[in-house]
Amino acid sequence: MTDELNKLSLKKQDLIRQYDSKEITEDEYNNKMSDVLAKIDYFTKQIINEQIDKIKEEVPKGRKPVDDSYTQLIITILKSDAIEDIEMAADAIDDIKPGRKRKRNIEHTREIIRFVKYKPVGRWQKYKWNEDKFMLNEVDKK
């Protein structure tokens, strides 16, 4: 899907170039651009849905989480390699467990990352933050 998305992005840039150089009329530009933007939106949503499905599969199934346990959900989401930034993590939290403000999900995610990075005491000692991959890893205790 990313190949199609890249091709559509190139087509979008080409349409802009054609319109700027007066190779196509404004009506042609608008019609073609709306088609390209609709396809880009479709493929983007497909990619996001695939990532959300992947995250949902990684949520622990063996035990029932505490009703208000966003912390465990955030830890599970941050362990996923599908998440690339805090915004995407907040979207995944809202998709899996809606009902809380997006700003609070972002703050809670940042708090967990800070605990792991700067104050690894207690329950946070078993995690290590990988900045390059934007990913939470469990440290093996031997």
Image (tube, rainbow, N blue to C red):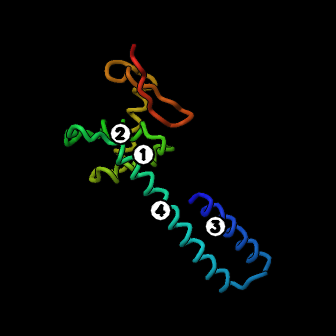
The amino acid type found where label 1 is placed reads: Ala
- Tell me the quarter of the picture where residue 13 sits: bottom right
State how far apart marks 1 and 3 are (Cα): 26 Å
Q: Which residue is mark 3?
A: 8
In the image, what residue occupies the spot 66% across and 69% down? 12
State how far apart marks 1 and 2 are (Cα): 8 Å
Query: Which one is earlier in the sequence, the residue at label 2 or at label 3?
Result: 3
Q: Is residue 2 left or right of residue 94?
A: right
State how far apart marks 4 and 2 are (Cα): 22 Å
Q: Which residue is mark 2?
A: 74
Within 10 Å of disc 3 (Cα), the crowding (few <14, some 14-19, many 20+) is some
Query: Which one is earlier in the sequence, the residue at label 1 or at label 2?
Result: 2
In the image, what residue occupies the spot 29% across and 39% down? 60
Residue situated in front as seen by the camera: 26 or 96: 96
**Residue 89 tag number:** 1
State how far apart marks 4 and 1 are (Cα): 16 Å
The amino acid type found where label 4 is placed reads: Lys
Q: Which residue is mark 4?
A: 45
